[in-house]
Amino acid sequence: MRISDLKLEKVIRDIEFDWLGLTAEEYEGKKVLTFLNDIKYLDEIEKNKTIVGIITTEMIAKELDRKYGIVVVENPRKAFFKLHNKLVDENFYFKKERNKISEKAIVSEKSIIGEYNIVIEEGVVIEDNVTIYPNTIIKKNSIIRAGSRIGGNAFEFSRFQDEVLSIKSIGKVIIEENVEIQNNCTIDKGVFGNTILKKNVKLDNLIHVGHDGVIGENTFLTAGVILAGRVKIGKNSYLGPNCTVKNGLFLGENSKISMGAVVTKNVGDNETVTGNFAIPHKKFLEVFKFLLKINEEK
């Protein structure tokens, strides 16, 4: 599809695209049309090798490299998300294909399996009352315990004065080999990209994984963990009970998030963080001991 096919307000430079996406995310193999309503995010666009076209304002368009396709509208963000929802309804992003469920998978008769675009490989176990939504891939020998929901729509809304627009999700959930998801977990599909649980990831009960997240190999999430959207976690990491991670953060390889932590900043490789708001564990202990000493002196 070309930008000129969209019949938006003013095309400065036409170009072909095959996906819509956000400036901060790369979409491998795609030619992405995005939006820009604040010049401060231009650096993200210039670093993103998948972006070919931009929906923006008249003023910002003057600052853009003419290598991009450019279309000018009054409200780029609103135009972008309304266009996205329209393209979803027109099956722009993908075709509906028949499910591929291995005869060697064990799928409970009490589970609910969506009607299209679901792959369940051999050795997979789907227990009672599990729901698998379209655009989900579950690879060999993974286990989904009772009551979990895989591939539901993301919690993604945009406000425009008095209007609230629900953003439709078109990404996938990809669950790699030997993943185990315990009871009553929810894994949201990506809005524009994919939510991925890599090999040997283990999820305890009552965990929420937000849209477009990536959980690295051999990582453990214990009961009650909440991951907001677009959280990326390196391999061999550990997240303690009831910790919460802000959207868009990166947790490095071998990182450890202590019980009940509220993580608002990126975490480095081999780093342990503790507290609300979470800080390096050693620093947390120093502050805690200092506060105890003050209290004892009162």
Image (tube, rainbow, N blue to C red):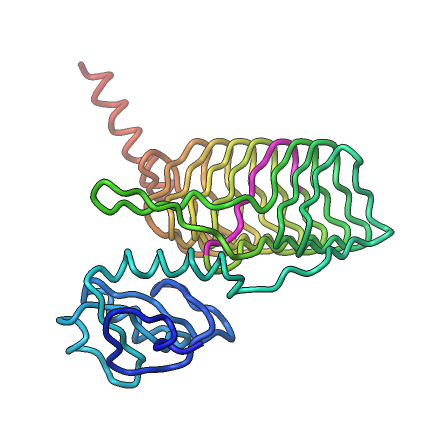
Q: Quadrant of residue 32?
A: bottom left
**For residue 187, side relative to residue 9 (left or right):** right
- Which residue, as the protein is rendered here, is positioned at the far bottom? 67
- Which residue, as the protein is rendered here, is positioned at the far top? 298
**For residue 179, side relative to residue 227 (left or right):** right
Quarter of the figure with the C terminus? top left
Task: Report x, y in % for residue 152.
Answer: 55, 44
Quarter of the figure with the N terminus? bottom left
Residue 20 is covered by the magenta coloring? no
Task: Report x, y in % for residue 63.
Answer: 16, 77
Task: Report x, y in % for residue 231.
Answer: 44, 51
Dominant secondary structure, magenta: loop
Task: Report x, y in % for residue 130.
Answer: 68, 36
Front-lying residue, 292 or 135: 135
Q: Quadrant of residue 275?
A: top left
- Which residue, as the protein is rendered here, is positioned at the far right? 103
Front-lying residue, 209 or 83: 83
Front-lying residue, 181 or 271: 181
Residue 60 to residue 100: above or below: below
**For residue 120, side relative to residue 273 (left or right):** right
**For residue 160, side relative to residue 247 (left or right):** left
Give the residues in magenta.
Answer: 181-191
How many marks overall?
A: 0
Residue 184 is covered by the magenta coloring? yes
Residue 42 to residue 289: above or below: below
Q: Residue at x 20, y 44 (%)?
A: 161
